[in-house]
Amino acid sequence: MTLTLLAITLLIGVTLCYTAVCAASPFGNCRKCSGWGFTFKTDRKGRMKRGKDCRRCHATGKRIRAGRWLYNRWARIYRAGTDTPTSGAAR
């Protein structure tokens, strides 16, 4: 098995695994707040406190995965391009 064939096989395998993850779980934890939905602050005594809500995930703690976002975009464009106009004369 050549090195090129091995690299192609590995790349296809990684792509299929990521596609399966995006299909099974389209949302992942937010990278900014680590899935908490807010940031942590420390008070003057050094104790952890709840900070402001995360602006990236809007305090949900979840974000849409890049692969799922691309699939949603593709599906929306495909549906918009294949819609047939429904007029009364075409029936």
Image (spheres, rainbow, N blue to C red):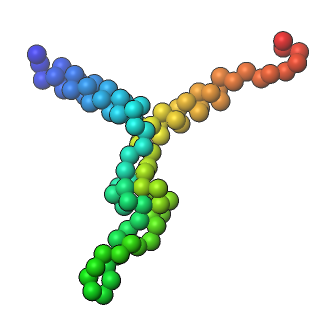
**What residue appears at the point 38 percent right and 46 percent down from the top-left corner?**
28
- Report which quarter residue 47 is drawn in: bottom left
**What residue appears at the point 62 percent right and 27 percent down from the top-left corner?**
79
Q: Residue furthest bottom?
A: 44
Q: Position of residue 83 (x, y in %)?
A: 69, 24
In the displayed structure, does residue 8 sit left or right of residue 25? left
Residue 53 drawn above or below residue 83: below
In the displayed structure, does residue 35 sit left or right of residue 89? left
Q: Residue furthest right?
A: 89
Residue 40 drawn above or below residue 5: below
Q: How many marks?
A: 0
Q: Quadrant of the N terminus?
A: top left
Q: Position of residue 16 (x, y in %)?
A: 32, 26
Q: Quadrant of the C terminus?
A: top right
Is residue 79 something one can see in this rendering?
yes
Residue 79 drawn above or below residue 42: above
Q: Residue furthest top?
A: 91
**What residue appears at the point 85 percent right and 21 percent down from the top-left corner?**
87
The residue nearer to you, when weighing 58 against 85, is 58
Is residue 15 something one can see in this rendering?
no
In the displayed structure, does residue 55 sit left or right of residue 20? right
- Report which quarter residue 12 is drawn in: top left
Q: Position of residue 49 (x, y in %)?
A: 35, 75
Q: Position of residue 62 (x, y in %)?
A: 43, 51
**What residue appears at the point 21 percent right and 26 percent down from the top-left corner?**
10
In the displayed structure, does residue 55 sit left or right of residue 8? right
The residue nearer to you, when weighing 25 against 89, is 25
